[in-house]
Amino acid sequence: MKKYIALVLAVLMMTCLFAACGKEPAKTDEKVWVVATDTVFRPFEFTDENGEFVGIDMDILAAIAKDQGFKYEVKSLGWDASIAACQAGQADGMIAGASIKQERIDSGWIFSDGYYNATQTLTVAADSDITGWDGLKGKTVAVKTGTASADYAESIKDKYGFTVNCYEDSPTMYQAVLSGTDAGCVEDTPVMKASIIDGNLALKVLDDTANEGMPYGFAIFDAKNQELVDMFNKGLANIKASGEYDQILEKYLGK
């Protein structure tokens, strides 16, 4: 009986203490945001020799999370699977070099502010005699499904007389060009240049074929996750102001 009374008194004392201080017990269920990505998209997201997810997008996300004080978990799912996971509620957001396009917004994507403006260019085999779009008549060009690069190729294919072959990921697309299956591929310029250097690929970027480009954005697919986009935007502004953003770009792209 004495033990019971002592326990009741202890509970009452704790209740009074929290009431007096105007506080509640610390929460142990802090939100961990699940962020989907495609880690075969150098230099924005890829897996290093230690199996860690690294790249411009990964560093920007980490810096923003630290600035805004939120926790997150990255899941490497691939491009199409990342979109599907967000739409199914299995992931809260997506960062994978996703271009901010009106048709995506119209179909339910909710974007952050743009965090990098990327152009798309034509890449061919290193020993190819193709120097521009004019050399592609009657040939095929590789693109990655659902990307701004695919849209760019589709928009000019009739003008230059080539057809488009679609692939699920960048490495497979590059191999199609290296093997001669396709005469060239259209890819985001910084991604293509980084991939050529890192993979020692026998490919060359035709810089004169670049378009005007468009910004990449962090994306959600459910308005209930708007808080995550708001934090991303605030954090992005802060790391730009502090100079950390420029340091991240320099780390992967040089000066």
Image (spheres, rainbow, N blue to C red):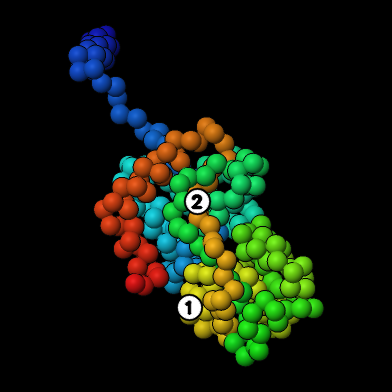
**What residue is shown at x 44% (from left), y 72% (from top)?**
49
Q: Position of residue 157 (x, y in %)?
A: 74, 68
**What residue is shown at x 56% (from left), y 70% (from top)?**
210
Q: Position of residue 149 (x, y in %)?
A: 62, 64
Q: Position of residue 2 (x, y in %)?
A: 23, 10
Q: Residues within 10 Å of mark 1 (few under 14, many from 20)?
A: few
Judging by the rendered image, the residue that carries numbered circle 2 is 217
Judging by the rendered image, the residue that carries numbered circle 1 is 198
Amino acid type, residue under disc 1 in the picture: Asp
| Disc 2 from disc 1: Cα separation | 25 Å
Quadrant including the N terminus: top left
Q: Nearer the viewer, mark 2 or mark 1?
A: 2
Residues 71 and 131: in front is 131
Amino acid type, residue under disc 2 in the picture: Gly
Q: Quadrant of residue 108?
A: top right
Q: Residues within 10 Å of mark 2 (few under 14, many from 20)?
A: many
Q: Is residue 253 above or below residue 132?
A: above
Quadrant including the C terminus: bottom left
Label 1: which secondary element: helix
Q: Quadrant of residue 11?
A: top left
Query: From the viewer's perspective, is 101 left or right of 216?
Result: right
**What residue is shown at x 51% (from left), y 83% (from top)?**
200
Name of the residue lying farthest toward the right? 138
Query: From the viewer's perspective, is 192 left or right of 182?
Result: left
Q: Quadrant of residue 38?
A: bottom right
**What residue is shown at x 50% (from left), y 36% (from top)?**
225
Q: Are marks 2 and 1 in contact (CB under 8 Å)?
A: no
Q: Position of residue 82 (x, y in %)?
A: 59, 51
The answer to whether residue 3 is visible is no
Label 2: which secondary element: loop
